[in-house]
Image (cartoon, rainbow, N blue to C red):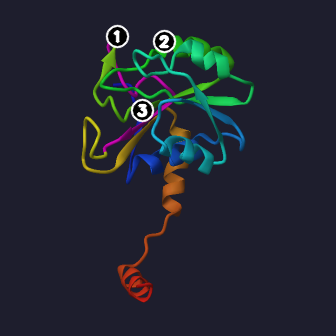
């Protein structure tokens, strides 16, 4: 429902890293995250050469608010990563009113709200891109893996190019090196 191009990935962490690389933000750019988040999210942001910036959450919903994002927004901010939680979506219209004029992307974290919708729009269909995780603790699980949604074909293509650079390791090499490291 308006999600764009889908890429399936082995994990949500790898998916977020691929997405940040595909969006091609300059090194040192700031990415705003909710202060209530999984530890891997800011770690992946840092791994991508970007700066995680934490915004406060609404104590009733545990989600970002437009006011908390506005409070930490700087000229170095390139994206906001709101996390949809507990089967609900974040206030994306309000976040958009802050982000759009500032030229800041919204990257939806849909790990806890697969299938959720607000005003007829599904989680993952509003921002520039979206990440889904299908781990064992999610409300939609495949026990592992994830998915990215990209609106723009060039971002999608950059992600595919990065994935194409990965080379699988031969099982015989894994067995040989695994045995010698025991």
Looking at the picture, tell me which residue is in the foreground, 149 or 173: 173
SS class of the residue under badge 3? loop
Q: What is the C-alpha distance between the residues marked 1 and 3? A: 19 Å
> Disc 1 and disc 2: Cα gap in Å?
10 Å
Task: Report the quarter where the C terminus lies.
Answer: bottom left
Tags 1 and 2 touching, CB below 8 Å: yes
Residue 54 at x, y = what percent? 59, 30
Name the outermost residue toward the front: 59
Q: Residue at x 43, y 22 (%)?
A: 62
Q: How crowded is mark 3: few (under 14 residues within 10 Å), some or many (20 or more)?
A: some
**Neighbours of disc 1 within 10 Å: few (<14), some (14-19), many (20+):** few
Tell me the element at label 2.
Answer: helix
Q: How many marks?
A: 3
Residue 116 visible in rendering: yes
Which residue carries the number 1 mark? 119
**Of 59 and 27, the residue lying toward us:** 59
Q: Against 108, is 147 above or below?
A: below
* Above or below for 126 versus 156: above
Q: Does the magenta stretch include residue 121?
A: yes
Q: In this rendering, is residue 25 above or below 95?
A: below
Q: Name the residue under label 2.
A: 93
Q: Which of marks 2 and 3 is in front?
A: 2
Q: Is mark 1 on a helix, strand or loop?
A: loop
Which numbered disc flags the more N-terminal residue, 1 or 3?
A: 3
Marked residue nearer the N-terminal end (1 or 2) = 2
Q: Where is residue 145 in the image (x, y as percent from the top left)?
A: 34, 50
Residue 141 drawn at (x, y percent): 25, 43
Q: Kindly tell me whether residue 99 is visible in this rendering.
A: no
Q: Give the range drawn in magenta.
A: 120-134
Q: Which mark is residue 4?
A: 3
């Amino acid at each position: 429902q308006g999600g764009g191009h889908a890429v399936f990935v082995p994990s949500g962490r790898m998916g977020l890293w691929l997405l940040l690389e595909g969006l091609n933000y300059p090194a040192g750019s700031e990415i705003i995250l909710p202060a209530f988040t999984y530890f891997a999210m800011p770690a992946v942001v840092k791994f991508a050469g970007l700066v995680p910036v934490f915004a406060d959450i609404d104590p009733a919903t545990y989600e970002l608010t437009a006011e908390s994002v506005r409070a930490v927004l700087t000229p170095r901010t390139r994206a906001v990563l709101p996390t949809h939680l507990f089967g609900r979506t974040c206030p994306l219209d309000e976040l958009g009113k802050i982000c759009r004029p500032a030229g800041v992307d919204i990257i939806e974290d849909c790990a806890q709200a697969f299938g959720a919708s607000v005003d007829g729009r599904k989680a993952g269909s509003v921002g520039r891109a979206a990440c889904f995780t299908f781990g064992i603790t999610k409300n939609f699980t495949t026990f592992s893996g994830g998915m990215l949604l990209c609106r723009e074909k060039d971002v999608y293509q950059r992600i595919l190019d990065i994935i194409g650079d990965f080379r699988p390791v031969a099982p015989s090499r894994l067995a040989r090196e695994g045995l010698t490291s025991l």
